[in-house]
Image (spheres, rainbow, N blue to C red):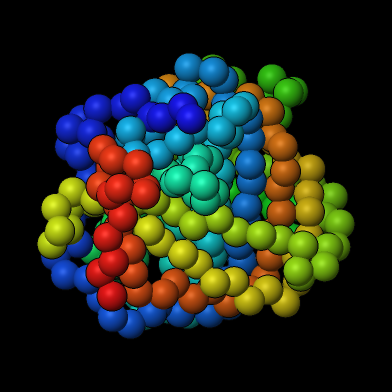
Amino acid sequence: MISGTASVDELAAGAPEIAAFGTESVRLGGVTGLSLVAELRRPAREAVLPPGLHPIVPPAMSLQAWDVTESPWGAFSAAFVRVVCRSGARARTFCVGAAASTASAVQGLQTQFGFPARHADVSLRRHYDEVGLRVSAESDIGGGGSDGRGKGHDGGGGRGNGVMLSVSALDPDPLSVGDLQHVGSMNLAHTPLGLRLVQVETHHEPSRVERLAARIEAFDAAAWGQPLLDPYWVVSCSVSLEDVEIPAIRFVCDPALPAAEGTERVQ
């Protein structure tokens, strides 16, 4: 089995801190959720993962975004860039970057669940015929072009102008609410047990799910904390109207060890 080759020490430099593991779940109400999977180019396969995680072939990026109406942190929008992988035999994702629209959401995502969140302008808008996602480090910034293959080029849209991500998704087609499956996230964080991969699950209760044809119009990999990411082809995209529950952390893993050796229970 192929294992990640990224330096744990280098990854740890930007890891958030969980001072104490919580015991209560966090419930997000009135959520519009966007899920997108895109293939990555070969250099991002094992080089972006710690040794305790295993890449898939071909490598893929999982993008998730939420527009949340109600939560313990108030209303907010957030986006998460994750690399699809496995922890032992289980499908997982490794979160390399996250952004949220409010300071309270950034703090909650960092300190309760170990997401490497930063403050940014996050806009997720759903209309009857399209869904648009835009993440910017600054307000009111123009977008860039697309190369027509499901991914935007960097000339004017991805680097140097504050745009971290821009996604356009068209022609929604209804799906059964049971057709959409979500994979848990492994977040590298400093915890009371030391530096660990924190296993974050999300329980989704959708009332409506639609699939769409999407393209990534701009993507600044460095702004998300991992310059090797190069998503070049969108595999799938869906939008859902749902409530989301994030249970308290139950398991963590040593990032340098396989899951069978390095998994610890915290609850």
Q: Is residue 138 left or right of residue 22?
A: right
Q: Is residue 231 left or right of residue 171?
A: left
Which residue is rendered at x = 30% and y = 48% of the image?
261
- The foreground one among 200 and 137 is 200
Q: Is residue 125 left or right of residue 227?
A: right
Which residue is rendered at x = 41% and y = 74% of the image?
247
- The foreground one among 175 and 134 is 175
Above or below, 99 relative to 264: above
Residue 109 drawn at (x, y percent):
33, 62
Q: Residue furthest front?
A: 261
- The foreground one among 107 and 112 is 112
Above or below, 248 relative to 221: below
Res 78 seen here: yes
Quarter placement of the C terminus: bottom left
Which residue is rendered at x = 40% and y = 39% of the image?
53
- The foreground one among 110 and 22 is 22
Residue 230 drawn at (x, y percent):
53, 24
Res 137 seen here: no
Above or below, 259 relative to 19: above
Q: To which quarter of the image does residue 46 belong?
A: top left
Above or below, 162 relative to 238: above
Residue 257 drawn at (x, y percent):
29, 40
Residue 37 drawn at (x, y percent):
63, 41
Q: Is residue 156 left or right of residue 258?
A: right
